[in-house]
């Protein structure tokens, strides 16, 4: 730390730190700001200690670390019962950030803050209840969540009002869609960045007139520039994509998106990337730019960006002849990463599908794992490739029981002659090998004949391995 700060008192340190956290300032340097806060905290300032906790919580000026933030907030709360620390602790315990979720502990912090006239606590507690309800289908918890959000609305909390508006706009949590009600709520708190951003990106919900919408755009631009508000820059980027009354302009959209990205908006890189990848919203199709932006988003942990990279590499690989195997391998890796990040079944299926196409036995254990996940979640296109690998994929994945189980599912979920031919062929393989059943040439041939009649070339080849005798079919091997 600069020696000139050594003799500054606590209040001066707090005031001086503020300019380092101002994103619109040429002095913006959150690390230096956090250093000043750290010194003020060492001098006994609980205000500075709480701000340092914010630095760790949001990853501004200090590495993001929920555990460190929680410990600091708890120190501040124990000494002051600060509403700010109570709300932050409520979020940490409620959502399980850096710790196992503890709803009762979260609720205790937030109810105390609410009783201490911190009305923002209502929206936070409502969000936690709704999050739990989404995970557990708990109707009572959902009702409790909506009740807390409503309390926040009645007491003028901006976030609660915004949250309720979204429920009306999108018909969430049992609330009937009512765009007019949503619009009225959003306009009530239109100085709140998230509400203003939604009004801008949603074309004023189709309700505001041209003059009002122009005023919203002007307000969003001014507030974004004055406060360095990334969500507003992102909303302005979306507003120029062509879905609002503004004239579509990918150049203006890109300019706003880049400003949002520079301010740490993680979603923006994904928006730019997919627009370039598909030529959406007036953007030129440009795989190089798409890759660069999607990689930035994926590095920030975006599952959607990881899956989109899988799409991008797959499309690019299939655009060459023969297919680019390196591109397909990259697609497989990104789809698999997307699944590991999100647990989404379709990411696993896409990885498995590409893995089959690669025909690389070293990947088969991972490919089978992905296809099993898809099959267990009733993605029927996973059944046949999974059955085939379980039979023909080599010793690392050979699993007759899995093959039989999967073929049964496939048989129940297809009326395609081609697919049925593949099922019959693989069934013949199992009978021929005696895999999971006693070897039976008669049943093997019967299955191969059925598959051959449906046009399966492999079954026709397999029939050459048998001959008809007076005692029935016999293997020639």
Image (cartoon, helix red, strand yellow):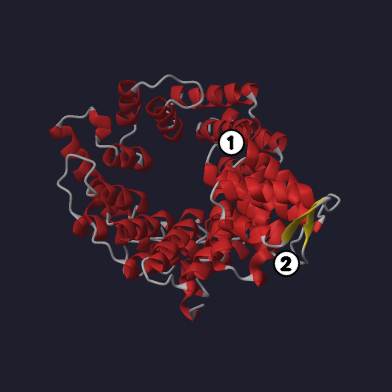
Determine which of the numbered discs, if any, sits on residue 394 in the image: 2
Relative image position of residue 194 (x, y in whole percent) = 37, 41
- Neighbour class for label 2 at 10 Å: few (<14), some, many (≥20)? some
Along the line of sight, which residue is nearer the eye, 68 or 297?
297
Q: Residue at image x 16%, y 44%?
A: 246
Relative image position of residue 215 (x, y in whole percent) = 18, 39
Along the line of sight, which residue is nearer the eye, 255 or 389?
389
Vertical position of residue 170 compared to residue 457: above or below: above
Q: Residue at image x 86%, y 51%?
A: 438
Determine whether the residue tagged by mark 2 lies in a helix, strand or loop. Answer: loop
Image side of residue 306 versus residue 213, left or right: right
Q: In the orientation shown, which residue stands out farthest toward the bottom?
A: 3
Vertical position of residue 16 compared to residue 160: above or below: below
Q: Residue at image x 57%, y 40%?
A: 83
Along the line of sight, which residue is nearer the eye, 271 or 120?
271
Q: Quadrant of residue 256?
A: bottom left
Relative image position of residue 425 (x, y in whole percent) = 65, 52
- Neighbour class for label 1 at 10 Å: few (<14), some, many (≥20)? some
Q: Which residue is mark 1?
A: 131
Q: CA distance from mark 2 to mark 1?
A: 44 Å
Q: In the rendered view of the protein, which quadrant contains the C terminus?
A: bottom right
Q: Quadrant of residue 69?
A: bottom right
Q: In the rendered image, is residue 75 in sight?
A: no
Q: Nearer the viewer, mark 2 or mark 1?
A: 2
- Mark before the other along the chain sequence, 2 or 1: 1
Image side of residue 452 versus residue 470, left or right: left
Along the line of sight, which residue is nearer the eye, 172 or 428?
428
Determine which of the numbered discs, if any, sits on residue 421 in the image: none
Q: In the rendered image, is residue 459 in sight?
A: yes
């Amino acid at each position: 730390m600069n020696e000139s700060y050594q003799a500054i008192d606590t209040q001066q340190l707090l005031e001086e730190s503020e300019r380092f956290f101002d994103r619109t300032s040429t002095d913006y340097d959150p690390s230096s700001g956090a250093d000043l806060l750290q010194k003020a905290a060492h001098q006994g300032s609980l205000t500075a200690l709480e701000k340092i906790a914010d630095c760790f919580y949001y990853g501004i000026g200090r590495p993001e670390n929920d555990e460190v933030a929680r410990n600091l907030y708890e120190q501040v709360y124990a000494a002051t019962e600060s509403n700010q620390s109570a709300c932050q602790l409520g979020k940490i315990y409620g959502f399980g950030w850096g710790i196992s979720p503890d709803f009762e502990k979260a609720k205790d912090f937030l109810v105390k803050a609410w009783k201490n006239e911190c009305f923002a606590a209502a929206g936070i507690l409502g969000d936690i209840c709704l999050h739990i309800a989404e995970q557990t289908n708990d109707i009572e918890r959902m009702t409790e969540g909506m009740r807390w959000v409503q309390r926040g609305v009645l007491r003028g909390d901006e976030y609660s009002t915004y949250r309720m508006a979204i429920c009306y706009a999108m018909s969430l949590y049992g609330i009937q869609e009512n765009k007019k009600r949503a619009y009225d709520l959003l306009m009530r708190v239109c100085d709140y960045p998230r509400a203003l951003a939604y009004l801008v990106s949603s074309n004023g919900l189709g309700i505001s007139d041209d003059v009002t919408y122009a005023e919203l755009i002007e307000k969003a631009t001014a507030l974004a520039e004055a406060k360095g508000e990334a969500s507003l820059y992102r909303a302005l980027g979306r507003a120029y994509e062509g879905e609002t009354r503004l004239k579509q302009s990918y150049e203006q959209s890109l300019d706003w998106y880049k400003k949002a990205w520079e301010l740490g908006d993680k979603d923006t890189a994904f928006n730019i990337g997919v627009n370039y990848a598909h030529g959406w919203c007036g953007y030129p199709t440009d795989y190089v730019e798409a890759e660069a932006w999607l990689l930035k988003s994926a590095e920030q942990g975006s599952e959607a960006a990881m899956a989109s990279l899988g799409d991008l590499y797959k499309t690019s690989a299939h655009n060459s002849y023969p297919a680019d195997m390196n591109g397909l391998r990259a697609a497989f890796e990104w789809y698999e990463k997307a699944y590991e990040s999100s647990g989404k079944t379709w990411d696993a299926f896409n990885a498995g599908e590409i893995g089959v196409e690669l025909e690389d036995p070293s990947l088969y254990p991972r490919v089978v794992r992905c296809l099993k996940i898809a099959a267990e979640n009733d993605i029927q296109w996973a059944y046949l490739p999974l059955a085939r690998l379980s039979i023909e994929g080599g010793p690392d994945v050979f699993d007759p029981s899995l093959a039989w189980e999967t073929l049964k599912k496939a048989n129940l979920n297809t009326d395609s002659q081609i697919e049925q031919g593949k099922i019959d062929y693989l069934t013949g393989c199992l009978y021929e090998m005696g895999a999971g059943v006693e070897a039976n040439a008669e049943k093997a041939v019967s299955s191969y004949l059925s598959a051959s009649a449906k046009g399966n070339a492999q079954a026709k080849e397999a029939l050459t391995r048998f001959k008809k005798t007076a005692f029935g079919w016999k293997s020639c091997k």
